[in-house]
Image (spheres, helix red, strand yellow):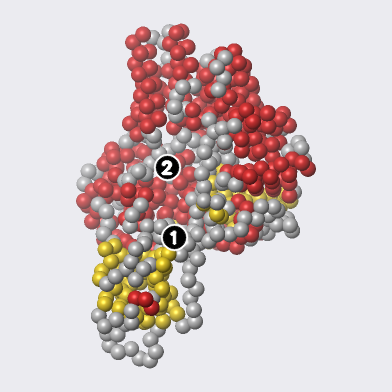
């Protein structure tokens, strides 16, 4: 029988303007976030409390975690799905139905969520924000660590009005999958990277996520003897030790023992959870919430629209703001950044320059103009004009750093300018050290810092930064730049840091492939999404269960075999055509037939109970529907 596909994503009509005619906006600041929203103020405070709690838990878990965010994070809490719709990302021109998402950026992060689905939205937001915190603290880590930590900490339950939380609750879908699947050897799990087929596609992708979660859970809560080893491992990763070496030094060379321990662990009945008590209440409010006018709210909404690919709508919204308030510097900045990200530097510069002149005390506005000036430098052939542009960029970025001393973004750009000019190398080193410390995941800052140290003749310190980047940089550009700079270290060691060598070095900084990422426009992609499926409605008299679809037996009719919560359900029908087969997977098509499935499939199975008493050995019910689920789908709790 053919499997009838059903659309994975629900298409909704985009509401461009306005978000909600009766919206009343509130602004709220906490220690680490800025919140705005048209949701009730009490609901915004609840979301704020949960995000601050989650951040506190993650900071405690990660060794040497910085308490300073490298760039600001703005959280927009929309009252309804209708209000969220204008900032939902697009896929092939259609709106992706999401409950919420995390959109990272080099200059500003956004979190957007639908207040009608707060708990569901926070699962995805916690997961992606965990990735950001891991990157900010540990830098680049193995994929199993990154995904396992995110999967482990995303399921956090707050208790006692902000004074305690519970972590470590086991997600049912991971437990079910692990108990019904063959685990990967630990060596294979450690070898998987972002380019591995297992990570990107295929039926084993779900097992990878589940096993990464299980290993983090075991090392964190399951074995007290292993917990200090895991902490040692994370600390070694943070200090730049190669991942393989760090694992061997922390856990020993014998992974077979860990294989056996994990196998036994995932087959136990219950998993431990941990209650964390805070010394004081983690509050969702650092200051009293205040009213926010609609124009300022529209600036944030328009900026976010541009970042998720809704540029036409963003431009319309921001121009409407400027027509009513021409001196709104942030609106001009958001508008100029649309052109900047499209690499229309000439169009972006006058808009961003006007915004910078309108508000000299807004670090975000000043930094945006400074970055556009640096992009202009790369397009300027004349040396005199190049140096004049660099001077303007230095003055602009100096204002930004003076206003916001904890912005890695502003400090990194100013360090780049000082290095390119070459007139104040100690200050370049200082700024780039600050940027690298605030944002360890940004390898470009370390490359530029190494370049500045070379120019100062501090060759050993430069080598200490470049060695790890050469061996395990995240891209070919990073590794190649590290190799080029190490060659420069070798040349300087032999001939000394002469004036000619310094001049060559200062010119070469603008040619570094990876460093160009600091100054050039970034491509904005759609955020990770929390998928809401258009599931078949459950009718009266029907029962739907989550399980693993294992086989179809064909003897005097058909019987579907589904493993649901450790119990094998046998669901019968006279023929396959009576069963509604629906797939929400992009990799599942073709037909189904009798026999065991080559690979068990995660499904919702819907059936009706038998009428009357069931005979011994009879099926558990009458099969109605089988819905094949995507790996990333998280059922509502």
Q: Residue 42: which quarter of the image?
A: bottom right
Q: Residue 582: which quarter of the image?
A: bottom left
Observer-side mark, 1 or 2, equals: 1
* Residue 298 picture location, percent across and down: 69, 47
Which residue bears the numbered disc 1?
A: 633
Closer to the camera in the image, 311 or 332? 311
Do residues under tags 1 and 2 come within 8 Å of each other at their CB atoms?
A: no
Which residue is at 52% across, 51% downward? 92
The answer to whether 449 appears left or right of 72 in the picture is left
Which residue is at 43% across, 11% downward? 501
Closer to the camera in the image, 103 or 273? 103
Callout 1: few (<14), some (14-19), or many (20+) C-alpha neighbours within 10 Å?
A: some
Up the image or down, 200 lies above or below 65; here it is below
Which residue bears the numbered disc 2?
A: 63
Per the image, label 2 sits on a secondary structure element best described as loop
Tag shown at residue 257: none
* Residue 335 picture location, percent across and down: 66, 38
Choose the circle earlier in sequence order: 1 or 2.
2
Which residue is at 58% across, 59% downward? 12
């Amino acid at each position: 029988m053919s499997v009838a596909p059903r659309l994975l994503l629900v298409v909704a009509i985009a509401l461009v303007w306005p978000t909600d005619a009766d919206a009343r906006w509130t602004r709220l600041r906490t220690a680490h976030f800025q919140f705005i929203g048209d949701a009730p103020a009490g609901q915004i405070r609840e979301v704020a409390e949960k995000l601050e709690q989650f951040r506190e838990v993650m900071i405690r878990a990660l060794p040497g975690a910085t308490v300073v965010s490298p760039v600001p994070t703005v959280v927009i809490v929309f009252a309804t799905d209708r209000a969220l719709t204008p900032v939902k990302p697009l896929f092939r021109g259609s709106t992706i139905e999401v409950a919420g998402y995390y959109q990272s950026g080099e200059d500003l992060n956004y979190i957007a969520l639908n207040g009608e689905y707060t708990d569901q939205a926070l699962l995805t937001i916690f997961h992606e924000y965990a990735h950001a915190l891991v990157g900010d603290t540990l830098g680049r880590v193995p994929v199993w660590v990154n995904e396992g930590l995110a999967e482990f900490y995303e399921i956090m339950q707050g208790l006692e009005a902000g004074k305690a939380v519970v972590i470590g609750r086991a997600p049912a879908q991971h437990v079910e999958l692990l108990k019904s699947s063959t685990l990967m050897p630990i060596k294979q799990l450690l070898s998987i990277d972002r380019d591995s087929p297992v990570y990107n596609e295929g039926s084993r992708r779900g097992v990878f996520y589940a096993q990464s979660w299980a290993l983090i859970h075991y090392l964190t809560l399951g074995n007290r003897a292993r917990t200090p080893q895991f902490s040692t491992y994370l600390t070694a990763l943070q200090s730049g030790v190669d991942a393989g070496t760090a694992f061997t030094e922390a856990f020993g060379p014998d992974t077979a023992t860990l294989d056996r321990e994990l196998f036994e662990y995932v087959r136990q009945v219950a998993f431990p959870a941990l209650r964390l008590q805070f010394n004081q209440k983690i509050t969702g409010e650092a200051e009293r919430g205040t009213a926010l006018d609609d124009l300022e709210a529209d600036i944030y909404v328009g900026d976010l629209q541009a970042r998720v690919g809704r540029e036409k709508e963003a431009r319309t919204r921001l121009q409407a703001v400027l027509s009513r308030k021409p001196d709104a510097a942030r609106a001009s900045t958001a508008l100029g950044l649309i052109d900047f990200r499209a690499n229309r530097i000439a169009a972006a510069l006058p808009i961003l320059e006007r915004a910078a002149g309108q508000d000299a005390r807004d670090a975000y506005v000043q930094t945006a103009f400074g970055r556009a000036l640096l992009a202009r430098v790369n397009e300027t052939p004349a040396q005199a004009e190049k140096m004049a542009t660099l001077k303007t960029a230095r003055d602009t970025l100096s204002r930004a750093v003076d206003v916001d001393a904890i912005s890695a973004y502003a400090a990194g750009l100013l360090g780049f300018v000082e290095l390119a000019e070459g007139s104040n190398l100690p200050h370049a080193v200082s700024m780039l050290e600050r940027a690298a410390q605030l944002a360890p995941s940004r390898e470009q800052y370390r490359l530029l810092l190494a370049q500045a140290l070379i120019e100062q003749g501090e060759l050993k310190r430069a080598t200490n930064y470049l060695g790890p980047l050469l061996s395990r940089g995240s891209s070919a550009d990073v590794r190649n730049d590290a190799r080029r700079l190490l060659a420069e270290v070798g040349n300087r060691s032999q001939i000394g840091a002469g004036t000619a060598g310094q001049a060559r070095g200062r010119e070469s900084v603008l040619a570094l492939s990876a460093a160009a990422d600091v100054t050039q426009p970034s491509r904005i992609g759609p955020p990770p999404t929390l998928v809401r499926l258009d599931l078949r409605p459950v009718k009266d008299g029907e029962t739907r269960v989550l399980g693993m679809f294992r086989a179809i037996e064909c003897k005097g009719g058909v019987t579907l075999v589904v493993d649901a919560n450790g119990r094998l359900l046998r669901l019968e029908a006279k023929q396959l055509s009576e069963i509604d087969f629906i797939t929400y997977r992009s990799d599942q098509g073709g037909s189904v037939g009798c026999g065991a499935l080559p690979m068990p499939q995660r499904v919702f199975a819907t059936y009706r109970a038998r009428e009357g008493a069931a005979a011994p050995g009879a099926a558990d019910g009458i099969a109605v529907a089988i819905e094949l689920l995507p790996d990333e789908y998280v059922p509502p709790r």
